């Protein structure tokens, strides 16, 4: 029995122990860029596992500038204005042989179909791609009273690196001005000089102060991400 085991070859044996290098298994693999990683998850699994790619823009949603897709129901009044990413695109030809498109747009709350008519499609077709960040305005419509869609009147394609930068006020809520968190946040904010004014609210005193003359920042994604980890996204609003 022992002799038989001596003649067996391990599944992991390459036949030459001298060639074995344990350091090979300790070498760290390069981490995928988060955008690429999320796109791969969505493409292979149909959902995001790590985080939603729009999670970094939660402060934009909290600003109140855009309608959340989940609110676009029969009770919604007026023109809809949404911010999200294109999830799918279907191009069709009209009876007059002009191209138009049906696209699906999703935000952090839900997704909705958007009808892009020929004139608008002609202007934007070169930019239409899955994963693009868009701002869409249009009338809300439904054929059956349940499944709603937006008839697109305007569509803007947004540069993800500039979305946060156009906001001019950053509101942050703190428990106390004497807290360690407050001191750490101040130190972090100084690393992002820019033109956005910060307004701090302190829960213990009810006081709100502006940093307009002392500290203005550039609200980049990396800054918002760190602030969320320190304060929680519910304590951050950007307008």
Image (cartoon, helix red, strand yellow):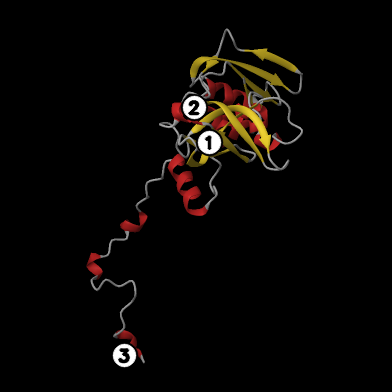
Element under disc 2: helix
Element under disc 3: helix
Mark 2: few, some, or many residues within 10 Å (few <14, many ≥20)? Answer: few
Task: State the image quarter where residue 14 is shown.
Answer: bottom left
Q: Which residue is mark 3?
A: 3
Whole-angstrom CA distance, mark 1 to mark 3, is 64 Å
Mark found first going from the N terminus, 2 or 1: 1
Of 120 and 174, the residue lying toward us: 120
**Quadrant occupied by the C terminus:** top right
Q: Residue at x 49, y 15 (%)?
A: 194
Name the side, left or right, on which 228 lies relative to 3: right
* Residue 118: % across, % down: 49, 31
Whole-angstrom CA distance, mark 2 to mark 3, is 81 Å
Name the side, left or right, on which 92 lies relative to 9: right
* Residue 58: % across, % down: 60, 32
Whole-angstrom CA distance, mark 2 to mark 1, is 21 Å
Mark 3: few, some, or many residues within 10 Å (few <14, many ≥20)? Answer: few
Q: Which residue is mark 1?
A: 85
* Residue 37: % across, % down: 45, 45
Q: Residue at x 49, y 27 (%)?
A: 119
Element under disc 1: strand
Of 112 and 118, the residue lying toward us: 118
25 above or below 180?
Answer: below
Q: Mark 2 near mark 1, Cβ–Cβ under 8 Å?
A: no
Name the side, left or right, on which 113 lies relative to 38: right
Q: Residue at x 30, y 79 (%)?
A: 9
Q: Which residue is mark 2?
A: 119
Q: Residue at x 46, y 41 (%)?
A: 34
């Amino acid at each position: 029995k022992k002799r038989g085991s001596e003649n067996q070859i391990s599944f992991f044996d390459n036949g030459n122990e001298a060639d074995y290098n344990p350091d090979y298994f300790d070498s760290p693999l390069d981490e995928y860029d988060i955008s690429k990683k999320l796109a791969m998850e969505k493409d292979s699994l149909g959902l995001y596992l790590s985080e939603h790619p729009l999670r970094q823009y939660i402060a934009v949603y909290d600003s109140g500038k855009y309608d959340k897709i989940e609110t676009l129901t029969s009770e919604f009044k007026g023109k809809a204005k949404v911010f999200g990413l294109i999830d799918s695109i279907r191009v069709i030809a009209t009876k007059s042989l002009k191209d138009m498109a049906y696209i699906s747009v999703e935000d952090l709350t839900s997704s909705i179909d958007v009808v892009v008519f020929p004139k608008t499609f002609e202007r934007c077709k070169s930019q239409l791609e899955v994963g693009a960040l868009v701002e869409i305005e249009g009338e809300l419509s439904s054929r059956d009273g349940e499944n709603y869609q937006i008839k697109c009147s305007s569509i803007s394609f947004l540069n993800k690196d500039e979305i946060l930068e156009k906001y001019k006020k950053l509101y942050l809520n703190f428990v106390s001005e004497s807290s360690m968190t407050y001191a750490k946040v101040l130190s972090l904010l100084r690393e992002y000089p820019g033109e956005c004014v910060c307004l701090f609210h302190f829960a213990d005193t009810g006081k709100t102060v502006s940093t307009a003359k002392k500290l203005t920042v550039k609200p980049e994604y990396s800054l918002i991400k760190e602030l969320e980890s320190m304060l929680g996204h519910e304590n951050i609003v950007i307008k």
